[in-house]
């Protein structure tokens, strides 16, 4: 195939995986290049998730000497992952964290990954693009923020990453209309219900977009529709950086050190530039020298690391001269509505990500609120389904009776675009982790616009389920995803990094992950984080050609 | 397939279920070994407790039985599964800044519930009749705001999260609700509404839980009110 050959020429990951029924290329890991601690490498990347792994792969391809450090394990799906909800606890970041504010946001399994592959190991698999409007909400709608880059800057990177994952779905009519490299998957009972209800309610819905290859892709096998996408894909069918970018990075000389918890970014206070990092591995502290550092620890750990790296010259933390680090952190409001059908839906079959609608994504001028929401199928497994039932106030025999009825329920979820607010932020908490480092405290409070979106999204989901024939509908309030916390801005007063992901005021320091997003739309952020990382890599490569003077000028 | 005695097949907690004969464990030879190991480990009944003290067990055991309506054998060993988790500190990581970390939160809330029992009925929680215990548990759920210096809703969330995670991780609970459990490398072939694999069991007593649920909860509240009048 023409398309696949083009992908293989720039990212061979899918062809570097084994094709014998096992899921990990152990030889590639054993033969990985090793750098000395005293070797001043070109770049240390902190975190091997959606941002860090793509950045590492792109720069390794460009000949940079890159060491990527990840706090968690180097996963082997055969050995480490289970086809079981409870047994997947190890996939989540479960180091202590405090949550507060008027509307505290639970972390852990909901939004925080661990190990090589990051949160994309346990994300559902939805990979929508942001809409062009997301990059200028301040100008267009008077809310949120304008990005220092436009959709057009990111578009070629969206296309490149969609081909590398690859993404399957119907032709997409919303935002910037586009097609997907793979055709849509067949849907299960939950997807059937959504399509039926949307059609009856006069709402447009489409199958996809999901980063699950439809058919073989390289040596990655076909999806087996087993429904455990959120527990780590043991099949290698669902995309995560562990299989889409890490193999190619290793083959091109990148070093990925797992189980290495970075404790501090080191800077030379006189020169105002980074010199490396310290990290903890099996109880010992190490120091890796580097010419540049890219922090890619996601919206909670990235701000925490910048705050933990304070020095006499940067007493409030790195990049924090304008008190911006940790601020404007966003989650999406994610109410989920479930409907009861006389038929058997058996929503545990087939991947939870199947069908979505972005009909309500943009600002509707006839409504009192700005921006919007998307609707997607979600298919909770029993433990998560119990949360839905408990949220209705049921316990004891009534809880058991609802649970026994599990096969009759279909569930939809919304992603509501909560607005960025300065007070929603990460600070250092008053307790310490097992390394003795202060933990992150994450405070969240909703604004009126957020609350209006939640109510409107719930009404629409309940309409769809009722139109599909549901006799009863129940709704649970949840949150999804994290972005922001070290946002991109045109000026240091408004953010932590510039349009090229360079941290204001510290030469050689970059943030390349979801924390740089100024707004979030109603889209799952994974694809956008990867696309930003691919673009950041191109900007770094271009910057290296013009010399260090240009970088220092920032 | 590992040997199982005939009386260990198609078990449901308290013998209740809507999928007669449905037996998740009958498919264990179609699972990968790592998953099978994780699930089968939940069947070996633990013999001792490491985290909870004797006094805490006296409160936690009836509390968990009530939350999950486990009023008879066979029981999913929920107390033991939670004890195992807390003993090794396997928490979700995050905690509300108005609550201690999960282990301490369990100890403290069990003590508070026992305190409620003493102040309202003059005896420890363990010594109360089930309807009195239920009234105290219902009171925690009904509290809006502060409960012994903690936020009642956050306490309720802690209890139910741990209880449901333990209970619905157990293959007997999956038999009860018609969920086939692990699916690798087997997967599914027949997708769609009312589509079943040949080994999936049809719902034998489809009953809408909504109406029955409302009746039970109404009765529970009325009973709690009666008790309330009796003790004042």
Image (spheres, coloured by chain):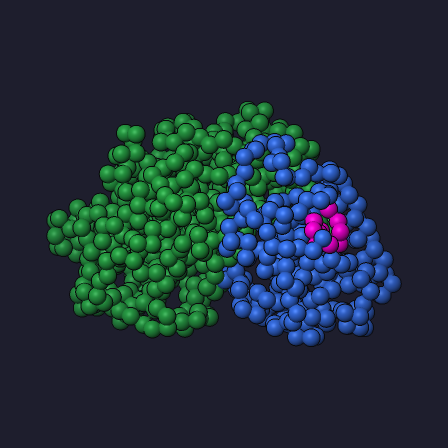
Chain colours: A green, B blue
Q: In the displayed structure, does residue A303 sit left or right of residue A226?
A: left
Rendered location of residue A9, percent (x, y): 24, 38
Q: In the image, is residue B5 part of the stretch drawn in magenta? A: no
Q: Please name the residue shown 17% across and 46% down the image.
A: A542
Say if A267 sits above or below A109 in the image: below
Q: Please name the residue shown 51% across and 46% down the image.
A: B184
Give the camera-side residue of B70 and B126: B70
Residue sitting farthest toward the bottom: B54
Q: What stretch is highlighted in magenta?
A: B7-17
Rendered location of residue A423, percent (x, y): 44, 55
Q: Please name the residue shown 40% across and 71% down the image.
A: A435
Rendered location of residue B150, percent (x, y): 62, 65
Locate the C terminus of chain B and report the quarter of the image it occupies: bottom right
Give the camera-side residue of A392 and A11: A11
Give the camera-side residue of A519 and B178: B178
Rendered location of residue B20, percent (x, y): 73, 43
Say if A401 sits above or below A31 in the image: above
Say if A517 sits above or below B77 in the image: above
Residue sitting farthest toward the right: B230
Q: Quadrant of residue A19?
A: top left
Disc count in the image? 0
Q: In the displayed structure, does residue A327 sit left or right of residue A30?
A: right
Q: Quadrant of residue B144?
A: bottom right
């Amino acid at each position: 195939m023409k398309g696949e050959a083009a992908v293989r020429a720039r990212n061979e990951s899918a062809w570097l995986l084994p094709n014998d029924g096992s899921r990990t290329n152990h030889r590639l890991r054993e033969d990985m290049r090793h750098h000395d601690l005293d070797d001043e490498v070109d770049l240390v990347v902190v975190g091997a998730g959606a941002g860090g792994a793509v950045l590492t792969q792109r720069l390794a391809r460009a000949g940079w000497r890159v060491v990527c450090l990840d706090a968690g394990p180097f996963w082997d799906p055969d050995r480490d992952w289970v086809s079981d909800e409870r047994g997947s606890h190890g996939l989540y970041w479960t180091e202590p964290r405090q949550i507060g504010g008027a509307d505290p946001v639970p972390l852990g399994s909901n939004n925080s990954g661990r190990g090589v592959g990051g949160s994309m190991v346990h994300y559902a698999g939805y990979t929508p693009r942001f809409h062009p409007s997301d990059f200028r909400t301040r100008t267009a709608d008077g809310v949120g923020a304008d990005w220092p880059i436009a959709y057009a800057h990111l578009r070629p990177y969206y296309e490149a990453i969609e081909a590398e994952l690859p993404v399957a779905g119907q032709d997409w009519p919303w935002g910037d209309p586009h097609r997907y490299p793979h055709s849509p998957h067949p849907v299960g009972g939950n997807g059937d219900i959504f399509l039926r209800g949307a059609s009856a309610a006069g709402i447009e819905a489409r199958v996809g977009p999901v980063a699950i290859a439809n058919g073989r892709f390289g040596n990655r096998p076909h999806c087996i529709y087993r429904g455990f996408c959120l527990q780590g894909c043991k099949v290698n069918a669902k995309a995560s950086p562990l299989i889409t970018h890490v193999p190619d990075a290793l083959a091109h000389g990148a070093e990925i050190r797992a189980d290495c918890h970075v404790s501090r970014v080191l800077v030379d206070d006189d020169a105002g530039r980074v010199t490396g990092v310290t990290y903890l591995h099996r109880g010992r502290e190490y120091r890796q020298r580097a010419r540049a550092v890219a922090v890619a620890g996601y919206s909670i750990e990235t701000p925490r690391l910048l705050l933990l790296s304070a020095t006499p010259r940067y007493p409030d933390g790195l990049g924090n001269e304008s008190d911006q680090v940790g601020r404007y952190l966003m989650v999406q409001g994610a109410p989920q509505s479930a409907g009861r059908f006389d038929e058997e839906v058996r929503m545990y079959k087939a991947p939870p990500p199947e069908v979505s609608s972005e009909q309500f994504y943009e600002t509707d001028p006839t409504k009192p609120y700005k921006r919007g929401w998307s609707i997607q199928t979600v298919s909770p497994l029993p433990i998560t389904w119990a949360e839905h039932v408990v949220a209705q106030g049921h316990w004891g025999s009534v809880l058991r009776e609802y649970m026994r009825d599990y096969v009759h329920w279909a569930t939809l979820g919304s992603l509501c675009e909560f607005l960025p607010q300065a007070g929603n932020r990460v600070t250092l908490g008053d307790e310490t982790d097992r390394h003795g480092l202060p933990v992150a405290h994450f405070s969240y409070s909703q604004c009126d616009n957020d609350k209006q979106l939640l109510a409107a999204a719930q009404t629409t989901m309940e309409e769809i389920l009722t139109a599909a024939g549901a006799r009863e509908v129940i709704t649970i309030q949840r949150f999804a995803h994290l972005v922001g916390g070290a946002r991109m801005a045109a000026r240091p007063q408004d953010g932590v990094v510039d349009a090229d992901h360079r941290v204001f005021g510290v030469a050689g320091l970059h943030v390349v992950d979801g924390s740089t997003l100024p707004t979030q739309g109603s889209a799952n952020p994974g694809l956008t984080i990867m696309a930003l990382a691919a673009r950041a890599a191109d900007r770094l490569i271009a910057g290296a050609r013009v010399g260090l003077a240009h970088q220092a000028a920032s | 397939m590992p040997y199982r005695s005939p009386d260990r097949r198609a078990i449901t907690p308290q013998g209740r279920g809507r999928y007669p004969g449905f037996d998740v464990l009958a498919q264990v030879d179609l699972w990968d070994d790592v998953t099978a190991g994780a699930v089968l480990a939940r069947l070996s009944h633990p013999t001792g407790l490491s985290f909870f003290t004797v006094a805490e067990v006296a409160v936690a055991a009836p509390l968990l039985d009530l939350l999950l309506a486990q009023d008879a054998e066979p029981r999913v060993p929920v107390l033991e599964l939670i004890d195992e988790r807390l003993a090794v500190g396997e928490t979700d990581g995050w905690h509300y800044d108005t609550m201690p970390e999960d282990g301490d939160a369990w100890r403290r809330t069990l003590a508070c519930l026992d305190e409620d029992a003493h102040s309202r009925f003059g005896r420890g929680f363990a010594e109360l009749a089930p309807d009195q215990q239920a009234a105290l548990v219902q009171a925690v759920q009904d509290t809006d705001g502060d409960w012994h210096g903690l936020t009642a809703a956050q306490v309720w969330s802690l209890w139910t999260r741990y209880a449901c995670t333990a209970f619905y991780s157990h293959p007997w609970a999956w038999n009860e609700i018609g969920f086939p459990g692990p699916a690798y490398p087997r997967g599914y072939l027949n997708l769609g509404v009312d589509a079943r694999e040949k080994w999936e069991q049809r719902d034998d007593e489809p009953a809408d839980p909504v109406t029955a649920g409302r009746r039970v909860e109404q009765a529970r509240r009325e009973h709690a009110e009666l008790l309330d009048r009796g003790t004042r």
